[in-house]
Image (cartoon, rainbow, N blue to C red):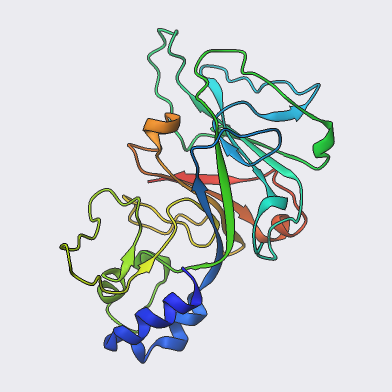
Amino acid sequence: MDLETFEKVITSAPDLAEHREFLRGLLRPCVRITITPEKPDGVQSQFGGSPMVPADFQWPEHDTFLYYFLGQINFAEIVDRPDPLPSHGLLSLFYADYDPDSDFGGELFWGNDGYLKVWYFDDLDALVKKKAPHKGKVPGRRITLTGGEYDMPRDHFMREEWPFDFDILDSLIDDPGWPYALRTVRAGDEPDPTFVLATDYLLGYPSYYSLGYNPTPGDDWVALLTLHSHEDMFGWCWQDANKLMVFIERDRLAVGDFSALKWDAG
């Protein structure tokens, strides 16, 4: 959502117009992630496929399950990059999942330590493509990263108090990934303006489909990455086909330290 859209929606909603400045103060910059049909090349940002890593990189190992390559974010590719994010470098993410060739019947819990493994590489010229040492690779898809957008809270749990009925705001928020309440418009009708917010994105607020609380770990933490379950494309199924939310401490983000992330799903 850009600021022009924000103003248009607020103007069309009399119950919110008097709270314009309050709502404007809630806006957070975000980077919309768009999945394309293109095949990624080299250090381009991507989901799936094979990672670009140092030549001596050791594929992460799990005691019981397997680690799969989630994707990589090339910060230099972000159009209109918000200040909190690095101007360069590659963020590489891996996640634990079941081994299709194993008879192990244990439970994999996304909340466990080590569910995600993340590396940040500063020297992109030293990276090479590495194939997974196991089956389960999915075709890679190029992703584009577009800043200059804003996000707002999508659930009343994101604040303790609201100066209006949150249902009014909720009725104006569209998340195209939301599986149960996609807005429909009859042919020929002019759709009402809405806050069409990103489904997959960097920064912003965490968003979810099934939680009953604010998943942010604490006041010093911010949302780093929020992803929908793209099961058909990448085999992702975050907590029963919901969303994965990754968090980072503000101070660590400011210096490009991605070594102590936390996450939630729902």
Question: To which quarter of the image does residue 221 belong?
Answer: bottom right
- Camera-side residue of 161 and 74: 74
What's the residue at 47%, 38% (across, down)?
111
Residue 56 % position (x, y): 81, 21
On screen, residue 175 above or below 91: below
Residue 163 lies, with reference to residue 143, above or below; the image says below
Report the front residue among 194 and 240.
194
Q: Nearer the viewer, residue 38 or 159?
A: 38
197 relative to 25 in the view: left or right: left
Q: Seen in the image, is 225 located left or right of residue 210?
A: right
> Which percent across, then down, holds residue 123?
83, 39
Residue at the farthest left position: 186
Measuring from the top left, give residue 62's x and y in whole percent.
58, 20
How far across and down, in percent of the image, does residue 251 sit? 72, 60
Q: Is residue 8 above or below residue 113?
A: below
Q: Is residue 207 above or below residue 190?
A: above
Question: Can you name the residue that lies furthest to the front here?
Answer: 188
Q: Residue at x 47, y 50 (%)?
A: 200
Please give left or right for residue 45 compared with residue 109 in the image.
Answer: right
